[in-house]
Image (cartoon, helix red, strand yellow):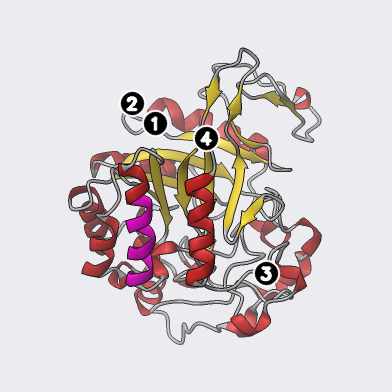
């Protein structure tokens, strides 16, 4: 055990009041057993205040333009329903954050501008609509009403702050209403993005499973970055989400320097996911939030790492795609895999629509 590993709470927050250091006892133990603050788990959660502050620039803190697309309290509707150039319709999907709290705070969090800010520190810097740690019942109802009435919106992603940190009765209220909309044919898919099974699986009680059972075929998007996070306690929660809640458990991983920028680590992680019956889904290049620049793996290295790892994986573990969430709210662009294309970095790359993105890299 690492001696004296204690969360410093709000003492190490960023200047806008976000990302306190919170470490549940479960996580303290895991960090202690896996190399301490400099180990692959510790690096993700133990603040490095001097380094973070030296890189801090608030102007860059909403790279995906989520605040700009907030249509109702906590509801970001960026990927809207529409028609393509041939007149074929496609559905829209919205992100619904009912809380800004998480069970622990990842130092590289793309929503670090708004998560973990105590109620008494909400201010102008917190976005276009005032952000509260938890939405009130009226605000939840307002957003549920928007979902119900918005033509073409048929998928909702409940995500971070972490929806499994709210009181189970609040979660149950939301899942009940979303489940109702699924049964009525208004909503097709509900995803739950959570890191609680990794941060603190002991927090998840029967009441949470009961609440989640109200959804039809929920997709659980589990953010995990290292095989050491998949402890027996975490795996037991994930198995119950799969079996008791009839859920599909899928993984999301952020590529982080010093944590998992290594072929062996990623190979072991995806192989474990597949072995446990879960689906590796996304690996993200980390978003450009200023205070977390030290976690960024240069894009050439990231692509080369992905190309080395991809051919080693079994097909059922290779369902993960390496994507970049392009700035300015455009969306995710998948990186070609396994050297199938000859990448000319100075020419950027194109997504499935043929749109070209400059990676800002000279050959
Ligand atoms: S759990 Fe998600 S929303 Fe919460 S701090 Fe980590 S990355 Fe951010």
Residue at the image position 67 percent from the left and 65 percent from the top: 113
Spatial CA distance of label 2 from label 4 is 34 Å
Choose mark 2 or mark 1, whichever is in front. Answer: 1
Residue at the image position 51 percent from the left and 32 percent from the top: 91
Q: Residues within 10 Å of mark 3 (few under 14, many from 20)?
A: few
Disc on the earlier residue, 1 or 3: 3
Q: Secondary structure at mark 3?
A: loop
Q: Is residue 322 magenta?
A: no
Which of 52/115 is in front? Answer: 115
Which percent across, then down, holds residue 230?
32, 56
Badge 2 vs badge 1, beta-carbon distance below 8 Å: yes
Asked whether the viewer can see residue 223, the reply is: no
Which percent across, then down, holds residue 281?
42, 38
The dot on residue 61 is none
Q: Secondary structure at mark 2?
A: loop
Mark 1 lies on residue: 319
Which of 264/120 is in front? Answer: 120
Spatial CA distance of label 1 from label 3 is 38 Å
Mark 2 lies on residue: 315
Spatial CA distance of label 2 from label 1 is 7 Å
Mark 3 lies on residue: 130
The answer as to whether callout 3 falls within 8 Å of ligand 1 is no
């Amino acid at each position: 055990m690492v001696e004296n590993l204690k969360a410093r709470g709000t003492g190490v927050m960023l200047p806008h009041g976000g990302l306190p250091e919170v470490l549940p006892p479960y996580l303290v133990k895991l960090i202690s057993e896996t190399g301490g603050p400099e180990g692959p788990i510790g690096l993700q959660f133990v603040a490095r205040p001097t380094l973070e502050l030296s890189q801090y620039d608030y102007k860059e803190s909403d790279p995906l333009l989520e605040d700009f697309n907030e249509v109702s309290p906590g509801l970001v509707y960026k990927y809207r329903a529409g028609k393509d150039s041939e007149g074929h319709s496609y559905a829209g999907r919205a992100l619904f954050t009912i809380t800004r709290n998480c069970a622990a705070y990842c130092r590289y969090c793309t929503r670090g501008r708004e998560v973990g800010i105590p109620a008494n520190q909400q201010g102008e810097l917190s976005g276009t609509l005032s952000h509260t740690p938890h939405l009130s019942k009226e605000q939840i109802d307002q957003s549920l009403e928007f979902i119900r009435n918005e033509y073409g919106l048929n998928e909702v992603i409940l995500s971070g702050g972490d929806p499994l940190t709210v009181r189970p009765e609040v979660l149950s209220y939301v899942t009940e209403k979303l489940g109702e909309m699924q049964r009525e044919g208004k909503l097709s898919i509900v995803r739950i993005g959570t890191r609680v099974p990794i941060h603190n699986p002991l927090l998840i009680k029967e009441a949470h499973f009961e609440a989640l059972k109200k959804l039809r075929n929920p997709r659980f998007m589990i953010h995990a970055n290292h095989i050491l996070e998949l402890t027996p306690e975490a795996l037991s929660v994930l198995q119950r989400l799969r079996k008791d809640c009839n859920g599909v458990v899928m993984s999301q991983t952020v590529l982080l320097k010093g944590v998992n920028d290594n072929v062996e680590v990623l190979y072991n992680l995806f192989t474990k996911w597949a072995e446990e019956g879960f689906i590796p889904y996304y690996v993200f290049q980390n978003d450009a939030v200023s205070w977390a620049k030290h976690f960024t793996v240069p894009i050439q290295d990231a692509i080369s790492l992905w190309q080395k790892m991809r051919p080693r994986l079994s097909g059922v573990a290779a369902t993960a795609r390496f994507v970049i969430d392009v700035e300015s709210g455009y969306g995710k662009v998948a990186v070609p895999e396994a050297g199938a294309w000859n990448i000319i970095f100075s020419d950027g790359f194109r997504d499935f629509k043929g749109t070209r993105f400059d990676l800002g890299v000279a050959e």
